[in-house]
Structures are given as C-alpha cells and as structure tokens.
Amino acid sequence: MNTIGNKIRLLRESKGFSQESIAQELGITQPSYARLEKQDERISITRLIQIATLLKTTVGDLIGEKAQKVINQQNSEYASAYVDSIINADKEHIATLKEEIVFLRQLLEKK
C-alpha cells in the first residue's frame, strides 16, 4: 500500500494544488511528480522535506506516527551508542591519566 504517496496526494488535493504546480515548484516534470505519488519508495528524504514544506505540513505527518517512532528509535539507538562510545573513551582516558600519575609519583619518590 502506498501510504506516503497517498497522503501527499490527499493533502495536495485538499489544498487545491495540481500535480503540475507542485512539480513546477520542485523543478521536475508532472509525470515525474505523479510517479512520486504512485511509487512513494522513490521519494528521497530531501524531496519529502520539499513536498512537506510546499504543502505546509511536516515529514512526520506524511510518513505517519508508526514510521516516525521507528525513525526516533533508530536515532535514539544511534545516540545511545554514541554516548556509550564517549563514556568508554573517557574511561580509557582516565585510566591513562591514572597510570601517568603513578609514573610521575614514582619519579618524584626517586629524587
């Protein structure tokens, strides 16, 4: 089922825009735009943002709540992994600093 393209079509029609006018704003031909509405898997994120802007809506509204949750979860997982990598790097840095302190103390004790 073509959910994104269908939502775009319904919203475009409700706002009284023709395919031609949206295509012209996007800098593509009307047949190319029509294919976007029929085959939404062809819509790039950049194009989706442009369409949402033209239709005065959000990408989240076009892709639906369920898809938005998946995107948010993926971003959350990426952010979590990034935070974990920072924490691990900090732990490694602290361990190195501790080793340096021990080494410097030993040097001072030898004097």
Image (tube, rainbow, N blue to C red):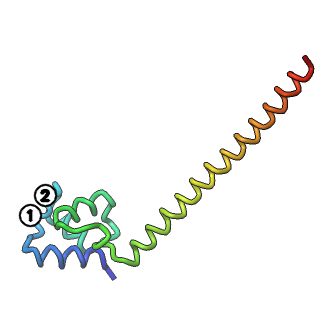
58 in relation to 83, above or below: below
Q: Which residue is mark 1?
A: 21
Dividing the picture into quadrants, the one containing residue 7 is bottom left
What is the secondary structure assignment of the residue under circle 1? helix
Q: Residue at x 17, y 57 (%)?
A: 26
17 in relation to 93, above or below: below
Q: Nearer the viewer, residue 89 or 38?
A: 89
Would you call the spot at circle 2 few (<14 residues within 10 Å), some (14-19), or many (20 or more)?
few
Q: Residue at x 81, y 35 (%)?
A: 99
Left/right of residue 97 with respect to residue 10 in the rendered view: right
Q: Quadrant of the N terminus?
A: bottom left
What is the secondary structure assignment of the residue under circle 2? helix
Q: Nearer the viewer, residue 81 or 48?
A: 81
Would you call the spot at circle 1 few (<14 residues within 10 Å), some (14-19), or many (20 or more)?
few
- How many discs mark residues in the rendered view? 2
Q: Residue placed farthest to the top in the image?
A: 111
Q: Quadrant of the C terminus?
A: top right
- Could you tell me residue 33's position as x and y percent? 19, 65
- Could you tell me residue 28's position as x and y percent? 17, 57
- Could you tell me residue 80's position as x and y percent? 56, 60
Left/right of residue 13 with respect to residue 90 in the rendered view: left
Q: Residue at x 9, y 64 (%)?
A: 21
Instruction: Calculate the distance from the C-alpha at mark 2 to the C-alpha at mark 1.
Output: 6 Å
Question: Are the residues flagged by discs 2 and 1 in contact, CB closer than 8 Å?
Answer: yes
Which amino acid lies under the numbered mark 1 shown in the image of this protein?
Ser
Which amino acid lies under the numbered mark 2 shown in the image of this protein?
Glu
Q: Which residue is mark 2?
A: 25
54 in relation to 40, above or below: above
